[in-house]
Amino acid sequence: MSGLILASASPRRLDLLARIGVVPDMVDPADLDETPLKAERPPAHAARLAAAKAALVSARHPDAHVLGADTVVGAGIRILPKAEDKATARRCLTLLSGRRHRVHSAVTLVAPDGTARHRLSTSIVAFKVLTPAEIDAYLAGGEWRGKAGGYAIQGAAEAYVRFLSGSHSGVVGLPLFETRALLGSAGLLG
């Protein structure tokens, strides 16, 4: 594959791309404000950020295909933050305990001619009721750091998931079915 740039520094996204035989030519993370707009719903927020990341990096590399992605955890119409501290992660886990929530994972591919293709994966995840000791143990492990909704399904949190409907890879951070479809429609897969 040539001329593909991943607009993300996420090692998880690189690992997920490798699962479908894709190795980007370059990684060039987009640095932008991820603050939700007023009254923005979780799926729209994920789609807007994926498109903005791809567009920003595409402007720096106009001759390449650029893949942007974003994953948002939503509880109802509420967008949960990326947990940067234990208190935020605890609030997220407490809110998600014993209930279903949605994980929206958006992907945008911008071609050298400026054409943008978009896909959105929405998965439903339900956690068991978490005890305070389970939340403390999870927080002690540190894998919540920087994760949407305060958890990483590909780690210890998977033991608390009692139900998942949708894309496991989308919950991790890059929906492979949708990503493969985008890359294939652009002629980037062999």
Image (cartoon, rainbow, N blue to C red):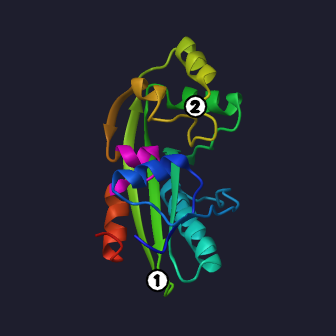
Magenta residue span: 168-176
Q: Which residue is mark 1?
A: 115
**Residue 176, horizontal then vertical, whole percent:** 35, 55
Which type of secondary structure does the marked residue at label 2 adopt? loop
Residue 143's tag is 2
Magenta span main SS: helix
Give the image quarter of residue 100: top left
Q: Is residue 169 left or right of residue 68?
A: left
Q: CA distance from mark 2 to mark 1?
A: 36 Å
Q: Residue at (36%, 77%) from the top-left corner?
A: 186
Q: Is residue 64 magenta?
A: no
Q: Is residue 31 left or right of residue 156?
A: right
Q: Is residue 110 left or right of residue 180?
A: right
- Dot 2 or dot 1: first in sequence order is 1
**Residue 68, horizontal then vertical, whole percent:** 52, 64
| Quadrant in which the C terminus is drawn | bottom left
Which type of secondary structure does the marked residue at label 1 adopt? loop
Q: Residue flagged by tag 1: what amino acid is it?
A: Thr
Residue sitting farthest toward the top: 133
Q: Where 181 sits versus 77, above or below?
A: below
Q: Residue at (63%, 41%) from the top-left corner?
A: 146
Q: Residue flagged by tag 2: what amino acid is it?
A: Glu
Residue 105's tag is none
Q: Where 89 sits versus 180, above or below?
A: above
Q: Is residue 77 visible?
A: no
**Residue 115, horizontal then vertical, whole percent:** 46, 83
Mark 1: few/some/many CA within 10 Å (<14, 14-19, 20+): few
Residue sitting farthest toward the left: 190
Residue sitting farthest toward the bottom: 113
Q: Is residue 130 visible?
A: yes
Give the image quarter of residue 8: bottom right
Front-most of residues 37 and 173: 173
